[in-house]
Amino acid sequence: MIKSKKIATSLSCLVLCLLTLCSVFVLSGCGGISIDVKANYLLHPVFSGCNGKGSVELELNYKNVDYAVQSYINNDKYSDIYSLVSDIDFELEDESVNGKLKNDDSFKVITKYDEDKATELGVTFTNTEITCKVQDLKDGTELDAFKDVKVTFSGEDGSGYASVNTDDCKRAVTSNVYFTFEDENNGKLKNGDEVTVKANLYSDDSSYFLKEESKKYKVDGLYGARKSLEGTDLGDVKEEIRKKANTATKDDVSIAHYDYKFSSGKKRDLNSYSFSFETKMEFEKYVYAYDPDDVSDNTLAGVYKLTTTAKCKNDQSYVSEGAEAMKKGDNDTGVTYIVVTTSDLIFSSDNKLYDNGYFSRYYGMESCADLNDIKDLFDNNNYVLVNYDENFKELKDAEPSTEKATEKATEKSTEKTTEKSDEKSTEKATTKTSEVSTEKATAKN
């Protein structure tokens, strides 16, 4: 009897074991597929930086993917299951902690995977939210990488380059840090742009951490055309323009052929044989013309007022149509504007005119009888014109048209003449009335 009880008990245990194994097989082989992300150590956090300035990169531990799916190697969809697990990604629940981690800090990681594919394959992931603890960050030294960095700019405005100079930086910086530009437009820079310089540690295991990881710098000093000439050094050009303008009074032939507006209001035909000339030249202004869309297209003009008194030495027997002949001893005074121009004013970073040693600046000279005609000398319709005084201070007030000023002066003269005539007429009428009244009163008496 005792023997049969032992046999019965052994059979009961065997049946129970078989049922348990069958249950396990049903859950893992015949039913849903469950993969524990945490238990299979699929997350591999990689720490870098220094204690208090630490960062973490979340990697998938590919070595453990095989271990996690080995139970399903006989499954018809094994390759799809393997692919699903291999494509797992991880994200920080709070991205702001990265770069600020210190030892013993805790942070949460969220597992990301293709949920539609997991449903299709019948795969369930468990422990997808994992809390990690920061460890093994070294104590480090803070580096102020940008303290002695100099960012310099070179080239033409609109196609300039930025570069980083670390010559004055401490060895701790030059040995552990390199600098890069985050902007993609280096080589296309223009004055006024901003560039961002990023400091990078050569090694993630460095015993240093950065006080600042990036810094912005404003672009300036690129040579090219300017929208304003205030503050620039134009000494040489001013002198060349003055010299060129002075030649206007050196040759009687040139003086005779300038286009004048005469005080008499008449048209004159001048020549160097029948006339002698007395001239007076006064600085009027500078006119700067620039194309805002082309940094190398600009012109500077020095404008001088030339007043010329022409004295007739011999009677003029012939003049062109519309002109009035002058007789010996007659004189008339005319005004013209001498305009000396030069182009391609390119400036260096210190506001001086750029000269690469091969460049020659050319000067031209024109004359205009009317100050308003000067703008017609600039045939580029896109030019912006700015007026300056002799010290290159911008003249804000627009200059009145000579023609309009003349018209206005004429109107005023007419008004005054009319007023004066009216006054005289009134006085005469009053006087005459008084006289008539007196005469009548005397006769009556």
Image (cartoon, grey):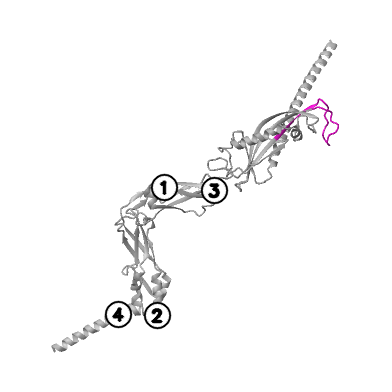
- Distance of mark 2 from mark 4, alpha carbons? 20 Å
Query: Which residue is denoted by mark 4 in the rendering?
Result: 23
Structural distance between the alpha carbons of marks 3 and 4: 77 Å
Count neighbours of disc 2 (C-alpha within 10 A) and say few if under 14, some if 14 to 19, many if 20 or more. few
Check disc 3 and give the amino acid type. Answer: Gly
Identify which residue is drawn at 38% across, 49% down.
173
- The mark nearer the N terminus, 3 or 4, is 4
Point out the stretch of residues depicted in magenta.
312-337
Q: Kindly identify which residue carries mark 2.
A: 76
The amino acid on which the numbered mark 4 sits, given as a three-letter code, is Ser
| Residue 171 higher or lower than 65, as above or below | above
In three-dimensional space, the C-alpha distance between marks 3 and 2, rounded to whole angstroms, equals 65 Å
Residue situated in front as seen by the camera: 104 or 232: 232
- Please report the residue visible at 68 percent of the width from the left and 43 percent of the height from the top: 378
Pick out the residue farthest to the top. 445
**Nearer the observer, 413 or 149:** 149
Q: Nearer the viewer, mark 3 or mark 4?
A: 3
